Image (cartoon, helix red, strand yellow):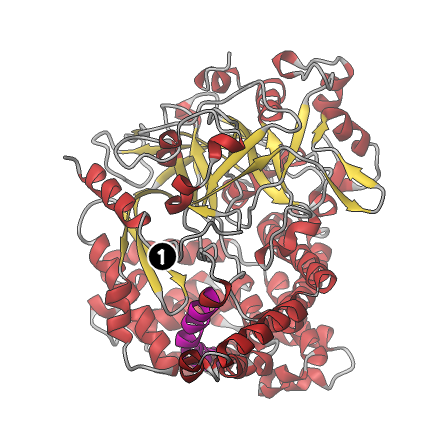
Amino acid sequence: MSRKVVNIISLFTFLITSVFFIGSSRPDEGMYPLSELGSINLREAGLKIDISEIYNPNGVSHVDALVRVGGCTGSFVSEEGLILTNHHCSFDYVRQASTVENNYLENGFLAKDKSAEIPAQGLTCLITTGYEDVSEKVLQFVEGKEGAERISAINKIRREIVDAYVKSGQDLSAEVAEMFIGKTYILFKYKEIKDVRLVYIPPRSIGEFGGETDNWVWPRHTGDFAFLRAYVAPDGSSKPYSTENVPFKPAKHIEVNPKGVKEGDFVFVLGYPGRTFRNRPAEYLRVEEDVRLPKLQFIFAKAIEELHKLSKQDPELSLAVASKIKMMANVEKNYRGKMLGMSRLSLVDKKRAEEKELQDFIDRNESLKSKYGNLISSVNAGYKTSLDEGAIPYAGLTLNRFSVSFQIIDLLAGYLQSRSQADDKRTRIYQDANIDDLLDEVESLFSSYFPDADAALFGVVAEATKKYPELQSSDILKKYGSVAKPYEQGVADYAEALQNSPVMTREGFFKFMKLSIEELKSANDPLVEMVMELNKYFDESSDRLRAADGKLNPLLADYVNVMMEFKAKSFIPDANSTIRLTYGYIQGYMPADATYYKPVTTLKGVIEKSFSSNKDFTIPAVLRELYAKRDFGAFKDEELDDVPVAILYNLDTTGGNSGSPVMDAFGRLIGLNFDRAFEATVNDYAWSQLYSRSIGVDIRYILWVTQKVGGADYILKELKVM
């Protein structure tokens, strides 16, 4: 029996136990783990194939066709390793392959044949091969530990479990996911593919049509798709890019249905949804509504504004920061939707009312009262640190995630500090065997370094310091809270430090790599001193939050236990990038009084929007020409008398489901999930059939664009649709 079959049988045995699913009745949520598939009457809902074709522990199924593509989902759609995912999931890799002269991001990219496919630098794909319950091992390791020590111990044992598995074979990757906080931990096992290449990327004016104007909005007309291909060595092992590599042969690929679907049709999605927070207490929701969402939204909105200004002045800088702007803009608008939804639905108040009933339930039972009597008050107290820290972690996130100079200095400091450790104790990238990876990272950072962008980001944090007094607990940031123009002052101060820092050149960086961490600290470099002091400040905040999380960890496990007993119903874990299924129907909705949105948009809508003066609605000239000639080819919907562009459905999705295949009743791919309606951004906290709608690009638009705009008939032949 092969290792894969053994792993899959073990997976199935594991899934039908209580690891994923606690209780006996059907859960309310629509994001089902594989363990629940047998208890859902998908046949009655409209599925026309056997459930074993979706997931089969003893053979090949649709699950084998799924891949994790970075932070997104993708699926194999041919025998030759062709992957279909979202344009926005490949965005940064296309950007990295682009130059001002050969701007694939703006103009699109088509490989004429396999030999012309280009590497998606840094992108790997993961194929799930097995699961293992490691809860007992984790909980035994952390027994008796509290506060920050508990969180550090959890992270340590998780790393050790992953490292042990990865070293046990070839081409392996893994993660230990927390299914229920402080309660359940699962080792997810993957085959890693290290050579992924760009095949066909539509122009940005198609793949990102509507831009931020239409983001999180229906009706939608975005051709958010991209074709990639996975490659392996001739012996089937995973190797980095090499001209000797060959297309990967997946165990399963998903058939494409070029006829699409219509309103009312049954559809389902398999994917790796990112994070939801539906099992969290009221005080957590309060932190979200009062702290994380509004403060990060403010910082990101200001950052987007300033980076846009710089982008207009410099085409190279514009290309370098495009991914940053896109990422922040996506989050910023999503958070606005979440805040609106939480307020509109009074989620915190409703959760508080539920917890009052829970407390009454506990108090009526002496056994429960002795165990959980102070649970809710203890949980509430545990979130005080998050309220007190306020904007501090989000200022740190902005600088450490988006400022290249912060990343360069942090990388250098980390390398110098690691040199005092034994090689096997160092972080992977600092180990001697991985020096080439470290140097590649250095080169990548410097190639994307633009001082004006970094200075602007520092200015944004300076501006936030004036708005959020908690940031003034940093001596460096304190002065900006008292100046009349904190943004301008921050930009000027940081720009001067950048200009005068010898570290911020390739030559200077490599010279400092030969020094010690003490010599770096004593180099009298104002930029290094500023960055290291701020990182110390942000790390201290993280330490306080980690200590609070450590105290909350066992409390939240108890919270789930007693809430389950109170509700006498099934619980499933919040989404955490592990595989889930959601199903429903192609269905419109009413976002406001007397307003009904149909669930299918067409090419006509693209053309109509293109007449706007809004640059987000610019389209390639060929698109207008094709529409004028009504050259719809084989992809015209007879009822609509047009090419369908996007579809709307009442499925339960979240971030991470981007790129998930949308499949019909026969398991054929009819669309590609890429977004949610604005009202559905609150899904991460509460999902409802009434307002939760997800958005996908219709397969007919994907095929039409690929053939008529891209001229890539060979892809359609590979998909066996022509």
Is label 1 in a helix, a strand or a loop?
A: helix
Q: Name the dominant secondary structure of the magenta segment.
A: helix
Up-down relation of residue 386 to residue 188 (above or below): below
Is 87 positioned to the left or the right of 196 in the image? right
Q: Is residue 271 one of those drawn in magenta?
A: no
Is 576 positioned to the left or the right of 360 in the image? left
Crowdedness near tag 1: few (<14), some (14–19) or many (≥20) residues, C-alpha within 10 Å: few
Between 557 and 28, the residue placed more toward the observer is 28
Classify residue 487 by image quadrant.
bottom right
Q: Is residue 559 one of those drawn in magenta?
A: yes
Q: Return the x and y of residue 695 as percentages of the image width and height.
A: 63, 39
Q: Return the x and y of residue 363 as percentages of the image width and height.
A: 50, 81
Q: Which residues are magenta?
A: 542-564
Classify residue 221 by image quadrant.
top right
State whether residue 527 appears in this view.
Answer: yes
Between 633 and 523, the residue placed more toward the observer is 633
The residue under the point 44% across, 43% down is: 69
Q: Return the x and y of residue 266 as percentages of the image width and height.
A: 56, 30
Three-letter amino acid code at the position of disc 1: Leu
The residue under the point 54% across, 50% down is: 655
Between 207 and 362, the residue placed more toward the observer is 362
Question: Which residue matches tag 1?
Answer: 439
